[in-house]
Amino acid sequence: MTKYIFLTGGVVSSVGKGVTTAALGKLMKERGFELSIQKLDPYINVDPGTMSPYQHGEVYVLDDGSETDLDLGHYERFTEARLSRVCNLTSGQIYSNVIAQERRGDFLGGTIQVIPHITNEIKARIREVGQVTGAELVLVEVGGTVGDIESLPFLEALRQMRSEIGRENSVFVHVTWLPYIGATGELKTKPTQHSVRELRSIGISPDVIVARSDYPVAESLREKIAQFCGVEPKAVIPVITTDILYEVPLRLEAQGLGDYLTHRLGLTATKTPDWSEWERLVAQERRDRPRVRVAIVGKYVELRDAYMSVREAVRHASLAVGVETELLWLHSAELEKGKGWEDLRRAHGIIVPGGFDHRGIEGKISAARYARESQIPYLGLCLGMQAMVIEFGRHVLGSEDTNSTEFDPHTPHPVIDLLPEQRGIGDKGGTMRLGLYPCDLVPGTAAQRAYGVPSIEERHRHRFEFNNTYREILAEHGMVYSGISPDGKLVEIAELADHPFMLGSQFHPEFLSRPNRPHPLFRAFIESVAERAEVKGRPAVERASHSEQRVES
């Protein structure tokens, strides 16, 4: 029978439940268990694909094209799993499915209720993870905070699951916050006690309490939490805030949580955890390294979580190259107003990430122009590639009206456009390219040198494409198409020949970057940035071959 670890959160939101879930996955993976991780999101949207990044942060795309919660990025980065659509479940999906069943008459005219119909659907979708992936262990994170009305059906479904599969096959981990009272210099456990009481009122008693804190937790507090919350003292796991994300699994391991969960679930580890690689990563993070500056020119920079995977990919590459990268967050719409240019000029490299809609696009194009004219390393991701192509098209064609039909449907020079076969599709979702697609690399190009292999697969999330009508004229002036779809129809990577490093990818390489295997394009970009800054890094992690970088495939 599949074993389950259910994770809930209490006291406050943003307590670090997603990172804790990912770190627990890493602990169990290091013991040789085949596992998968699922996120239960209480919102009624079917998925985050149509949600504003200001509302939800980054939309993380999986191999199969599923648009999911950003926590799935944490899961994949920590455990090196390749997750699928079954790993992100929303209230919207559940209610849509149940209503569709009712409309078909599947319930034979019965009254549809939260219990049992909604909870049965939730349980079926949780069990589906093990059935689809073959995982012997499934971690399930419940979004939100205990006490939220939206998450009650999920918690009720988990309560029912425990009674059905047995306590020996399930563990509840409750992640809480210990607030610090500055006036008295005390950490307080009462909010954790109330949170556990709220959970118990639903019928769930946690087996493990992960107590997050900004300050050291005394043994007496640990014993107090155990006594008042009805768990073993060794099952109270204090986790002190760290500025190094990848240190969290090491701290949980030091507290014995991996061994405790293994014993509690009656599992037998098939290997001894080897943390040497992650210890080197953390040691490299703490080491003084030469500093470089990279500007991220985006549309949602007020909420850094909108670019979570980009930020982490830069971190991975910086650790591998041996530099410390200071990120300068610049709003592209502000560049249009003449603001932020001083910071842009201080940067040793520029990243223009993805996005939709016309707002701030001219600021991104201006950043691309500055990078081209000033010979500053540039990495364009999805829309960032398109901004690079538009800017170069304006330069080559001598027309400021050169544009994408996404932003100017009547542009005389649509260097970015919908494909002919896309134009007759009424549903915008039907015109999206989502998920993993193959790409052939051109020998001798910067992209091919970075990857070191002839072909790759990368994750996409976009609608508009490079317009092949302009391939020849832009190539004549120095644009190189270094990545092409196997049928030769789609430009996937473009770069400039007469430039230290100016490259744009139609896909999102950040989604496949890992802490110990930085994405090749990000690594090549940071290496160029270090050269621009005239610094020499001290890498702690040897560069992995591309075949090693793609072991997840």
Image (spheres, rainbow, N blue to C red):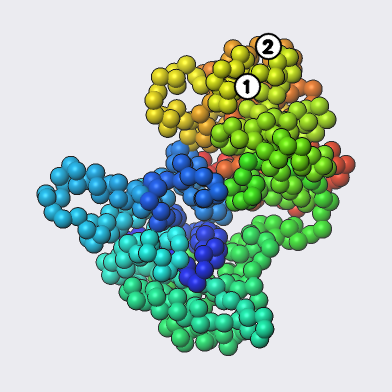
Number of numbered discs? 2
- Is residue 425 or residue 219 the one in the foreground? 425
* Residue 373 in view here: yes
Q: Is residue 370 left or right of residue 31?
A: right
Q: Residues within 10 Å of mark 1 (few under 14, many from 20)?
A: many
Q: Residues within 10 Å of mark 2 (few under 14, many from 20)?
A: few
Q: Quadrant of the N terminus?
A: bottom left
Give x and y (percent) for residue 234. Answer: 51, 80
| Residue at left offset 48%, top offset 45% | 51
Q: Is residue 503 left or right of residue 28?
A: right
| Residue at left offset 52%, top offset 59% | 18
* Residue at image mark 1: 403
Give x and y (percent) for residue 494. Answer: 66, 25
Give x and y (percent) for residue 482. Answer: 66, 23
- Is residue 74 or residue 1 the one in the foreground? 74
Q: Is residue 347 left or right of residue 137?
A: right
What distance separates the C-alpha of mark 2 from that of mark 1?
15 Å
What amino acid type should be assigned to the residue bearing mark 1?
Answer: Asn
| Residue at left offset 39%, top offset 75% | 198
Which numbered disc covers residue 473? 2
Q: Is residue 1 left or right of residue 324?
A: left
Q: Quadrant of residue 446?
A: top right
* Residue 76 in view here: no
Q: Secondary structure at mark 1?
A: strand
Which numbered disc covers residue 73? none
Q: Quadrant of residue 338?
A: top right
Q: Secondary structure at mark 2?
A: helix
Please tell me whether residue 481 is drawn above or below residue 194 in the rendered image: above
Most extreme residue toward the left is 108
Please tell me whether residue 17 is drawn above or below residue 445 in the rendered image: below
